[in-house]
Each structure stands twice: as C-alpha cells, then as structure tokens.
Image (cartoon, rainbow, N blue to C red):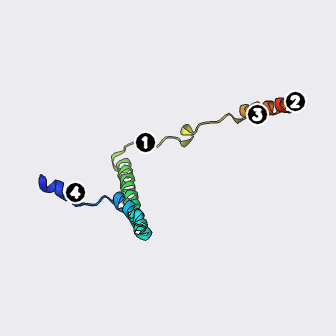
Amino acid sequence: MSEETMENENEINPLQDMIQHAIDQNYNQANNAFNDMMTVKMSDLLDQEKIKMADQIYNGAESDEEDPDEDQLELDLEDEDEEESEEDEEESED
C-alpha cells in the first residue's frame, strides 16, 4: 500500500504541470500539456457516447436526449422594451 501512494506522489498532475510551465514562461510546453489534457477528456467523452449508442442499438435502451427546446428559456422582451420606452418618455418629459 505504501508503494502505491509513493507512485501516486511521483506522478505529476497534468494541470499542475501546465500551470508550472506557464509560471516558468514555457508557453509552448504549457500549450502542449493543455492539448494533451483536452485530448484525454475528448477521448473519454467519445468513449462514453460510443457506449451509450451501443447500448441503444444492441440492448434497446432508450436515449436520454431531451428536446433542446425544453431547456431553452423564453425571454419576454416585449415587456422590457415597453418599460424602457415608458421610462424614456418620463425622463424626456422632466
């Protein structure tokens, strides 16, 4: 167990590595570290999507996708415009 913790301590956190490169003004290395982190994250997300799709195709699972319009909030801009125009009229009268 102590060997595992020592190995974890010896591993460099990619985020800390990127920040250290930026502090040291090694911007090319910081950029490479950032690109590596994003590549790993994108690969993980793609793998998750592949698993979801395979589950839907082969196991008949239903998709979790919701209608994007349901999440979109509607703004009532007409009321705000009317209020602003009323305020403008009151200011111009003064």
As drawn, is 10 to the left or to the right of 63?
Answer: left
As drawn, is 90 to the left or to the right of 27?
Answer: right
Q: Amino acid at mark 2?
A: Glu
| Residue denoted by label 1 | 64
Measured from the top left, where is residue 4 in percent x and y? 16, 55
Q: First in sequence: mark 3 or mark 1?
A: 1
Q: First in sequence: mark 3 or mark 2?
A: 3
Whole-Å distance between the Cαs marked 2 and 1? 56 Å
Whole-Å distance between the Cαs marked 2 and 4? 71 Å
Measured from the top left, where is residue 7 in percent x and y? 19, 59
| Residue denoted by label 3 | 84
* Tag nearer the camera, 3 or 2: 2
Q: Amino acid at mark 4?
A: Glu
Q: Residues within 10 Å of mark 3 (few under 14, many from 20)?
A: few
Residue at the location (70% across, 36% down)?
A: 77
Q: Quadrant of residue 80?
A: top right
Q: Residue 93, labelled with which disc? A: 2
Measured from the top left, where is residue 34 in percent x and y? 41, 62
Contact flag, marks 3 and 4 (Cβ < 8 Å) = no
Q: Residues within 10 Å of mark 2 (few under 14, many from 20)?
A: few
Q: Amino acid at mark 1?
A: Asp
Q: Residues within 10 Å of mark 1 (few under 14, many from 20)?
A: few
| Residue denoted by label 4 | 9
Q: Is residue 35 above or below residue 66?
A: below
